[in-house]
Image (cartoon, rainbow, N blue to C red):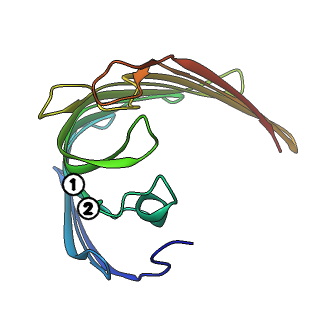
Amino acid sequence: AFSENSRWNRAAFVQHRFHTEWFSTELGLRRDQNQQFGAQNSWSGTLTLPINPDNDVLLSYSEGFRAPTFNDLYYPKYGNPNLQPETSKSYELQWRSQLSDSTHLEASLYRTDLSDAIIVDSTDKPQNVASARINGMEAALKHDLFGWQGNLGLSIIDPRDRSTGHTLARRARRTLSLDLDRQFDQLGLGASWQAISSSYDDADNTQRLGGYTLLGLRSR
């Protein structure tokens, strides 16, 4: 039994795209009107510069808005009714390259600044972190080999509480993933492997959580 059991969120989104031989742009605006947390505007924009037919450089900026869920706010013994919505601003530099007909590479550097970030602490109760920053690097290599479609991904991040300098709780710094898929006539087979580095279970970074790996198999 939650102290609140309903709310509405109304939103409108508009996007504009412009494309020429030398560059392209994409601009977006979303406005949310939340019954509980009021109005919020979120902007986004991307500039794409083609270096040559096989390489593009992208510069982008985006804003985010995340309202706490009812579980975050009201779950018995674990909810925090004083939570505020999380907002963010992200800046990204990305490179996309078609290395060959069967090989595609993407790499990006980014920074995300968060206000009132919603973080679950070691007691499983969500809390707001007033100011946080995530610096990150991501890379993805897609390649077709002997009929198999492979996707290798790497993510390295530095998620920090800016007031204390500590790493944000339950945020792993490194993630490595590999996906393989192949179609045999009417049968499709695939596998996913993911390795997650260690993280901390608390805001003071005294309780370490071990890293782990996941293996998934699928067919259709």
Indicate which disc, 1 or 2, sits on the residue closer to the N terminus.
Answer: 1
Q: Considering only vertical position in the picture, is 117 above or below 204? A: below
**74 lies left or right of 213:** left
Residue at label 2? 84
On the image, the x and y values in percent for residue 139 come to 38, 26
Disc 1 residue crowd, few under 14, some 14–19, many 20+, Cα 10 Å: some
Quarter holding the N terminus is bottom right
The foreground one among 81 and 56 is 81
Q: Could you say which is closer to the camera, residue 206 or residue 170?
A: 206
Instruction: Report which residue position mark 1 lands on.
Output: 62
Q: Quadrant of the C terminus?
A: top right
Q: Amino acid at mark 1?
A: Ser
The residue shown at (31%, 78%) is: 36
Which residue sits at x=44%, y=39%? 123
Above or below, 14 against 56 in this view is below
Image quadrant in which you'd find residue 174: top left
Q: CA distance from mark 1 to mark 2?
A: 20 Å
Residue most extreme to the front: 77
* Circle number at residue 7: none
Residue 178's quadrant in the figure?
A: top right
Q: In this figure, what is the number of numbered marks?
A: 2
Q: Position of residue 33 (x, y in %)?
A: 28, 81
Q: Secondary structure at mark 2?
A: loop
Q: Is residue 187 left or right of residue 142?
A: right
How many residues crowd mark 2 within 10 Å: few (<14), some (14–19), many (20+)?
many
Residue depicted at 57% across the width and 19% down the height: 212
Q: Residue 126, how many percent across, how many down?
A: 38, 49
